[in-house]
Image (tube, helix red, strand yellow):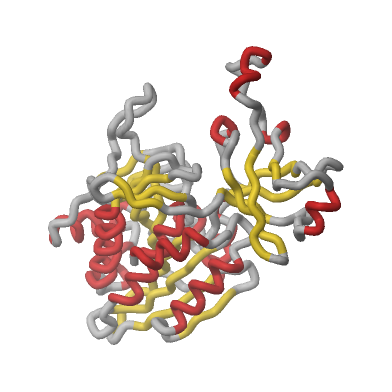
Amino acid sequence: MREVLKDLTELSGPCGFEHDVARYIYNKVQELADETKVDGAGNVTAVLKGAHDGPDVIVSAHMDEIGFIVKKIEDNGLIRFEKLGGHDDRILLAQKVQIRTEEGLRYGVIGTISAHMMKFDDPQKVRKHAELYIDAGVDSRQEAEELGIQIGDPVTYAAGELTFGKNRIMGKSFDDRAGCAVLLQTLAELDRSEFHGTLYAVFSVQEEVGLRGAKVAGQHLPADLAIAVDTTAVSDTPEAMMDNTLGLGKGPGIKVMDFSLIASVPVRKKLIKTAEKHNLPYQLEVFPGIGTDGGALHQSNSGVPTGVISIPTRYAHSPVEVMDLSDLENSKELLKLFLLELRERSEFKFI
């Protein structure tokens, strides 16, 4: 799982441009599933049938990462850009980026003024992304175009994952390539001779711009219940708004609610029961500042009981997201063991 996550984070795949990630995952799941398909939106769905009758369950993890798109190339070769997904403009300055062109990756940096010029500037000012530019190392629009850079090319933070500290990694796009790695490993380890039901493993597109892929998947897949696997932002650092309700290394979050979903009570209780039965650490997550594929899946068809397994991270939507590897492993174990506990289609009914 660790190597798969490294592979996934090295790929460029912002919202609407998940193609390379989808190809990688499609090739992986073909060896693991009974059926693999890609729908019109770009979602990759792997179908795995258990040896016993049981519920239809969707498990979704999104392939897209936050990024940018080339909007304009100035005469001097500097590149204006728009956002794909949610960003904090305060962290954009001086970040290394990669531009995915039809001729391969090109690198650049989001420009900033020299520290020597701060005395001529307002140090409190946060420049909006529309005021910023990417320096691709050229002096003209023609030179940029000769590198293959065009309007509409996707841009992400430059890849580069590092292991550090006791058991932690930092890098881009853990949101939600970590969830994709968890779902891939679960497919690899799930003993179908012990599994009751049918699993629809959905690797979705465009979650970061409105849960769009999950909405499409939920409209055409049967489901007695659904689980989203995504990252969540912890609150264990000293900033004033942090309340220390979620922390790194303390186990996966079991969602209670966020702005897109109030988790199904029976699904949540089943996740808790599974974690306690198998001595897995977990945290209950009440965090209105986030949304997941679960927000779209629970509104599918006539309504689907839905829960979320959340992988704790720090510094979400940045090029240096941080994750504890024990949380990654325990999230995979919780998902796998939860699926193996399933028996009855009616278990998650509202009343």
Q: Tell me the residue at 59%/17% (across/down).
A: 123
Report x, y in % for residue 33: 41, 82
Find residue 147 and report its horizontal and vertical position in percent.
76, 58
Q: Quadrant of the C terminus?
A: bottom left
The one of 39 and 315 positioned closer to us in this rendering:
315
Name the residue at the top extreme.
119
Q: List x then y, in percent, for residue 335.
A: 29, 64
Q: Is residue 332 above or below residue 49?
A: above
Q: Quadrant of residue 224?
A: bottom left
In the image, taking residue 15 as reference, residue 189 lies left or right, namely left
* Residue at (42% x, 84% y) in the render: 31
Residue 302 appears in the figure: yes
Asked whether, in this view, residue 304 is left or right of residue 156, the answer is: left
Q: Which residue occupies 27% across, 45% down?
A: 165
- Of residue 36 and residue 83, the one placed in the foreground of this image is 83
**Residue 90 at x, y = what percent?**
56, 30
User: Residue 127's quadrant in the figure?
Assistant: top right
Which residue appears at 83% of the width and 41% of the height? 76
Count of numbered circles on the image:
0
